[in-house]
Image (cartoon, grey):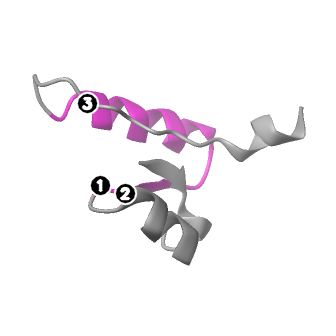
Amino acid sequence: MVAPRHILDSDFNRVHSGAALRRGYTDLHGFFERVVSAIKTGPERNFIYAYWPELDRL
């Protein structure tokens, strides 16, 4: 799970992500760094949930 650092450990995100590794970011550059890092964690297929809250404003 990739989410803004300030909400990463909220009750909702802890329940939502379960045992998944949570990666926090503070800006758009960090968002993409965390997504790329999650993609490169290994050769197996994974689901990556990446949340950018600015999309909610559209």
Q: Quadrant of the C terminus?
A: top right
Q: Residue visible at 26% across and 61% down?
A: 19
How many other residues sit within 10 Å of disc 2, few (<14), some (14-19) or many (≥20)? some
- Dot 2: element: loop
Q: Residue furthest right?
A: 58
Residue 39 position in % (x across, y down)? 29, 28
Viewer-nearest residue: 32 or 43? 43
Q: Which residue is mark 2?
A: 22
Q: Is residue 2 left or right of residue 27?
A: left
User: Quick one: label 2 or label 3, which is nearer the N terminus?
Assistant: 2
Q: Is residue 11 left or right of residue 48?
A: right
Q: Residue visible at 54% across and 63% down?
A: 5
Q: Nearer the viewer, mark 2 or mark 3?
A: 3
In magenta, the rendered stretch is 20-41
Task: Determine the CA span between mark 1 and mark 2.
Answer: 6 Å
Q: Residue visible at 40% across and 57% down?
A: 17
How many other residues sit within 10 Å of disc 3, few (<14), some (14-19) or many (≥20)? few
- Dot 3: element: loop
Q: Is residue 56 magenta?
A: no
Q: From the viewer's perspective, is residue 27 above or below residue 15? A: above
Type of the residue with mark 2: Arg
Q: Which residue is mark 3?
A: 46
How many other residues sit within 10 Å of disc 1, few (<14), some (14-19) or many (≥20)? few
Q: Residue furthest left?
A: 43
Q: Which residue is mark 1?
A: 20
- Residue 35 picture quarter: top left
Residue 55 position in % (x across, y down)? 77, 35
